[in-house]
Amino acid sequence: MKDQTDIAALMAEIGARARAAAAELAVADPATKRRALKAAADAVWQGRDAILSANAEDLALGRDKGLSAAMMDRLALDEARIAGMVEGLRAVAAQDDPVGEVLAEWDQPSGIHIRRVRTPLGVIGVIYESRPNVTADAGALCLKSGNAVILRGGSESFHSSGAIHACLVEGLRAAGLPEDAIQCVPTRDRAAVQEMLTMTETIDVIVPRGGKGLVGLVQREARVPVFAHLEGIVHIYLDAAADPEKALRVVLNAKTRRTGICGAAECLLIHRDLVGTIGQGVIRALIDAGVEVRADEVLLGIDGTVPAGPEDWGCEYLDSIIAAKVVEDIDGAIAHIRRYGSNHTDCIITEDDAAAAAFFARLDSAILMRNASTQFADGGEFGMGAEIGIATGKMHARGPVGAAQLTSFKYLVEGDGATRA
């Protein structure tokens, strides 16, 4: 294993090469970037056997390490998930290029014409844990937005991420773009992460994707700006005017489709008037689907529930577990979400337009939903092709971070010999 000095030198070299590549990408024409992404998609599909072989190696190591079922699910690839990566790469390729888009323009009485246009951020560092598909998503979105990217995947997905990265490089090569535009940190050494957090001269923003421990570390120690969400503590509130069929369908999908993603529902809030009807039916359906329901004292009367403790409010389980609580009304639901939520995604099930409007207006989560599964909290489902993460902060990007959100802007000012009085 390399010592700290070697890691520092390695990361400095990677950063310098990324900065040089970013200068070329910033002026790459849309057709060239599109060609690179399509070639990368073809390479991923053609190389799926190698990717699956690398993933099998990661899964074996994960089992040896005793990773949870949810973590193993996030790590696992199959042909369908590889096909999803390919689809995401092609979808990003097909999107309009954000670089150079005119966001606004106007004339001033002084004779100057001003345009505000999108411009790449420069170099993006992405630090992620077990999901190897982030390699493809992040690489594609950074390339589309004219940014170079340094990818540091988790040790669990080291082999899978490396195999996917090789396909992205093949796409760059096919389009004649610098191969340093998408780099993968070639070591599991955690010192590489610490280096990335302080590379202010070569990295413009860090995007962490992972659990609370990773994201908290990045937010505490980074000297580089950060796009991040700390946790996906996702709530669904069954309002007094909830439709029973919609409630059952949405809650089951939001909890059980994939329990290990950040859009999975973690807490169910039930209006007091629904306890004996819709609320009871939804909870029984969750239990029948194999979900452990940790209930407050009111809901413990439902067979199969277990008592919730204080630690269950505001918990991101990423597993087949959900907390459930009765609230007096929409005010109680909003108060609970404000106290325990993480500003990621929250949902109301209701046929009452006024209740939905109040829920949308009074909560400030990055994504708010009505009568729709919270598993739609995903850049691909938002039409972005893919996402680099869900940002819950209030500066710059918020919600799913796609290609357009990975840009800043600059002002282009033109005159005809204009001078200031």
Image (cartoon, helix red, strand yellow):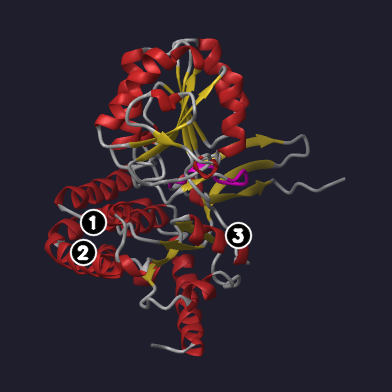
Give amino acid for label 2: Asn
Give amino acid for label 1: Ala
Element under label 1? loop
Question: Residue 359 in the image: x percent, y percent?
Answer: 56, 22
State whether the magenta stretch is mostly helix, strand or loop. Answer: loop
Q: Nearer the viewer, residue 200 or 171?
A: 200
The label shown at residue 339 is none
Q: Nearer the viewer, residue 147 or 50?
A: 50
The quadrant holding residue 117 is top right
Q: CA distance from mark 3 to mark 1?
A: 31 Å
The residue drawn where x is 48% and y is 58% is 208
Give amino acid for label 3: Pro
Q: Quick check: marks 3 and 1 in contact, CB under 8 Å? A: no
The label shown at residue 76 is 1
Q: Which residue is mark 3?
A: 225
Quadrant showing the C terminus: top right
Magenta stretch: includes residue 297: no
Element under label 2? helix
Query: Is residue 420 depicted above or below 122 in this figure?
Result: above
Q: Quick check: marks 1 and 2 in contact, CB under 8 Å? A: yes
